[in-house]
Amino acid sequence: MTRLGRISYVNMAPVFYGLEADVEEIEGVPTELSRMLLAGDLDIAPIPSIEYARNADRFRILPRLCVSSEGAIDSIQLVTRIPFGQIRSVAVTPESATSVVLVRILLPKAEIVPLGMEADATLLIGDAALRSAFEDPTPHFDLGRLWLERTGLPMVFAVWAAPEPVVDGLIELEHSLVASVRLARSEPERLAAKASETYGYPAGFLARYFEKLRYSFGPRERAGLYTFLEMARDVGELDHVPELRFVREEVPA
């Protein structure tokens, strides 16, 4: 049975909404899933796009799936009362490497400190960011929106990666994941109601959130990912920009 990692945030609800596949689901935050993949404890998982790039010689990625946004994403927020251009320090979550690198790109002069330390701004991701945007009146800067304003491209936060040698059946699993997303898109009210029961947010709030998430890994997303990786290299967060190496079906002999 394929060991499939699942990010433990509400953003995975559409991907697993109608999934019909013989898999063992293993939950964790993005950085945990990356560590589990590298340790050989998972067969495939969505991981931070920067973590794929840092370990591209060990991974293959699914060609049709990612987690991205073209503009605001709601679940990646910089919370601060200070004007954006005046931020000099950011306390960051340990849960997502991509978002931390994105902060370095957008605020190259800011000091990065661990979450919990005093700082001008706090980086929140996933459900913590959604809760904060929903409950906290402090100004929030959405990193997806800031990235689009900077580059005009989608921001790819995660890709589905598999360690080499890849297990059999990953392309079939990708078909099932894509089909689940399509079913979720065709039943938005039911998706929102089901996710509301599981995660506790109002259904209307979740419906608006799901509209902002993108899962297709098309040409614009790939251009956005390469741009992000080039900028990550330029701020010293990546040694070099790797090629995107995809999972391919083996041709029978």
Image (spheres, grey):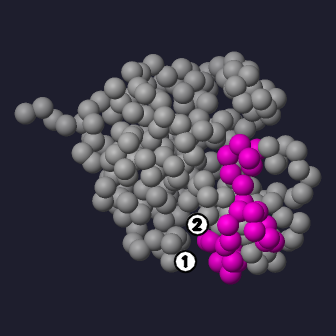
**Residue bearing the label numbered 1:** 235
Q: Answer above or below: position of 247 versus 154.
A: above
Q: Residues within 10 Å of mark 1 (few under 14, many from 20)?
A: some
The C terminus: image quadrant: top left
Q: In this view, does 133 lie to the left or right of 29?
A: right
Q: Position of residue 18 (x, y in %)?
A: 54, 20
Q: Name the quadrant containing residue 79.
A: bottom right
The N terminus: image quadrant: top left
Mark found first going from the N terminus, 2 or 1: 2
Question: Dot 2: what SS?
Answer: helix
Q: In this view, does 33 lie to the left or right of 22?
A: right
Query: Which amino acid type is shown beneath numbered disc 2?
Result: Val
In percent of the image, x 19 and y 37: which residue is there? 250
Disc on res. 117: none
Q: Can residue 136 be seen in this view?
A: yes
Q: Name the quadrant containing residue 167.
A: top left
Residue at mark 2 to residue at mark 1: CA–CA distance: 9 Å
